[in-house]
Amino acid sequence: MLYNMRYNEAVNEDEQELIANATLAKWKERQQAAGSEKLKLFNMESCGQDVVFETKILNRVINTMIVMPWIGTLKSVDNPSKGMRVSDGFVVLINERYALTAANVFRPDVQWRSITLKHTLFSIDEKSCKFGPCSPLSFSAEIKYVTIHPQYNGTLNVHNIALIELVEPANVTEGLISPICMPLTEEFRNSTPLELLVPSSFFNQHSTQLEPLDLLNCQERFAQLSANVTLNSRSRCAVALDTDAAEPAALYAGTPLQTLLRVGSKKRYFLSGINSFMHLVNYLNPNSPYLFTDTNAYLDWILENMQLNGSVPTETSSNVKRVDPPPTQNISRRRLFNFKTCGAYTKGSSANATYETEPWHGFVHNWDPVFNSTSFIQCSVVLVSEWYTIGVASCLNPDIKLWVQFGGYGSRLWGDCWDRNGTRICRPKTYQIAVERIIVHPQYNIIGYKNDIALVQLATPADISQPNVQPICLPILEEVRSYAVSSLAMVTMGLEDFTLLTSKINGTQFVPSTECQRRWDGMALNIQIEQTKQCILVVRDPRNECYPALPGFPLHTTQQLLGEQRHFLRGLFSLRPELCSSYYPAIYTDVDVYLDWILDNMDERLGISRLPYNLKQHLIFSEK
C-alpha cells in the first residue's frame, strides 16, 4: 500500500525508466482486455499533467502560475432571484464527463448546482482581457447526475465520496481543462511516488508536500488533540513534510490528495484521496493530521457508476398532447370574474406594438428611500380581476409595503414618444397601485419552492377601462378546464429594453413532470415538481442565448370562450435554470392546481356590484 512506500529515495534512473515503461505497457494491455471496456474512459496519454499559465498584458508576461487543470469548484445558488453563486467545495475531473468530490459538500436547501473549471484564473487575468484577446476566465459545466455513495454517513464521516456526471463533456482540448490520472491498475497503485501533495484552497500552484501517516499513529494524534475522529480501513492520513513551513495547507472541502508518479517518459499526477473535512486549515497545530477518503478503495464503485455512453437517456420530446385538470369546486366565486372581457388581447404588428406588454402584466415595486420613490424589484404578478393579482410567493414579501405597476414595464407617467427610423413610437401610460395585502399559500416553503403562489389584493381597483390594463381569464369554467399543450405560450423579456416577448410552446419544450423531476433530482436538490409544477425548456434568441424571465411571468393558453379567442392563466414562472440550460427546464407553479385555494381566499364583497351584467344570463352552471 501507498502508506508504507518510501519517498524521495534515490533510484537508478535507468531502472526507474524501465519500471515506468513496464507499468504503462501493463495499463495498455489491461485497457484492451475483455471486460475492461470502461477503462477506455481514461486516457493515460493526456491525464495528470499540470500546466504553466502565463498572464500577459501587451504581450508582456507579468505573472506565471502552475495550474492543476483537473480541479474545479462546485458552485451553488441558494436564491436564484439574487443570482449569487457560492463555492461549496472542490471537484476533481477524472475524465471529460465525470468528476469526484466529497459527499459532504452537497448541503441541503440549495436550488442549483454547477461546476466551474479554470476557476483559478481571476483578478489580474480578468484585467488582461481588456488589453487584447484572451481565453475565457472560467468555464461553467452543468451537472447531470450526482451519485452519493449509498452508505455515506456524515456524522461518522464514512464513505464520504460522490461521483458527478456532466450534461456535456468538458472541453479537455482546452489547455486549462484536463483530468487527473486514476490508479486503475495494481502497478500504478504500488508504484513508488515521487511526491504526495495537496493544492491550497485558493491557488493550485501553491501546494503542500505531505508524507503518509499510518492509521494507528493518526488515530493517536487525533486523540491527543481531543478530536472526535474515527478512522476506518478506507481512511488515509498524512502530515506536512515540512512542519516548519510558514503557511499551512488550507484544504477546501473536496481537495484532492495527489500522488506524482512516473508513467513512461512523463511524470503525472494521480488521485489517491479526497479531503474528508470541511474547509480545514491547520493554523493552530501544523502537526495535526490531514484526513482523506482513500479513493483507491472506491475504484470499483466509481467504475460501476460510470457509463460508457452517458447515464439514462432523456426524453427528447413530449408525448403529452393534452392536459385535463379536475373541475373547480367553488362555483359561487365564479361571479367575481367578467368572462365577457377577460383575456382578450392580440398584440399588434406595428412598431409601437414592440413595446406593448400583455395587459394583465403587473410589475412589483417597493419604496426606495435613496431616490424617494418606488423601485422595481424584478418581480411580476398577473391581473386576474380588478382587485386581485396572482404571483409567486418566492418574490413577494408580505411584511413590506409594495406597489404594482400596470400598463407597461417601463415607468411612464404620461407615456413616452420618440422617432425611430422615421416612425413615431409611443409607449403607453403606466400607473401604480398600492398592495393592500398578500395572501401566501399556507404550505409555501422556499426550500424546494413548494406551493410557490400568493394572492395579491390591491388597495384600490385597477382601472381596466384602458386597453393596456385588462385581466387575464382564470380557467375555472368547465369548457376551458382542459387544454392542448400546443395552445401554451410563455412570456420572457425581449431583445430590446422594456419589451416582452410571447412565444408559443412547441412539443420539444414541454417536459412531462416525471421527466422534469428526474432531471432536477440529478443535481441532488430538494425540489418537488410532480403534481404542482409545470416544466418548459427556455426560449432562445437568434444568438442562441436565453431570453430572461422574471418570477411571476405567466404561462397561458389561448382558447375559445363565448365565440372569441381568450387567454387563460396556466402557470407562473417560479424557478429558472442557470447557465441558459438546454437540459433543465424552467419550473412554473401550476395555477390549475391552486384554483380552489385562490377562489376561497378572494373577498367576494369586492367588486360584485361593479359587474356590468348578470353572469347567469351568459353562462350556465351545473351543480357540483
Image (cartoon, grey):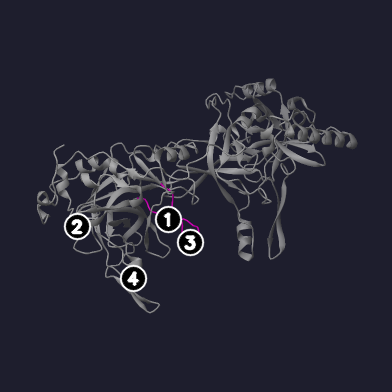
Is residue 396 something one can see in this rendering? no
Q: What is the tally of numbered marks visible in this picture?
A: 4
Q: Which residues are magenta?
A: 536-551
Residues under labels 4 and 3: Cα distance? 21 Å
For label 4, the residue is 350
Could you tell me the amino acid type at mark 2? Thr
Residues under labels 3 and 1: Cα distance? 14 Å
Residues under labels 4 and 2: Cα distance? 23 Å
Tell me which residue sits at (71%, 31%) in the image.
184
Could you tell me the amino acid type at mark 3? Pro
Relative height, residue 130 to residue 90 (above, below): below
Answer with mark 4 or mark 2, whichever residue precedes in sequence.
Answer: 2
| Mark 4 Cα-neighbour bin, 10 Å: few <14, some 14–19, many ≥20 | few
For label 2, the residue is 341
Image quarter hosting the N terminus: top right
Answer with mark 2 or mark 1, whichever residue precedes in sequence.
Answer: 2
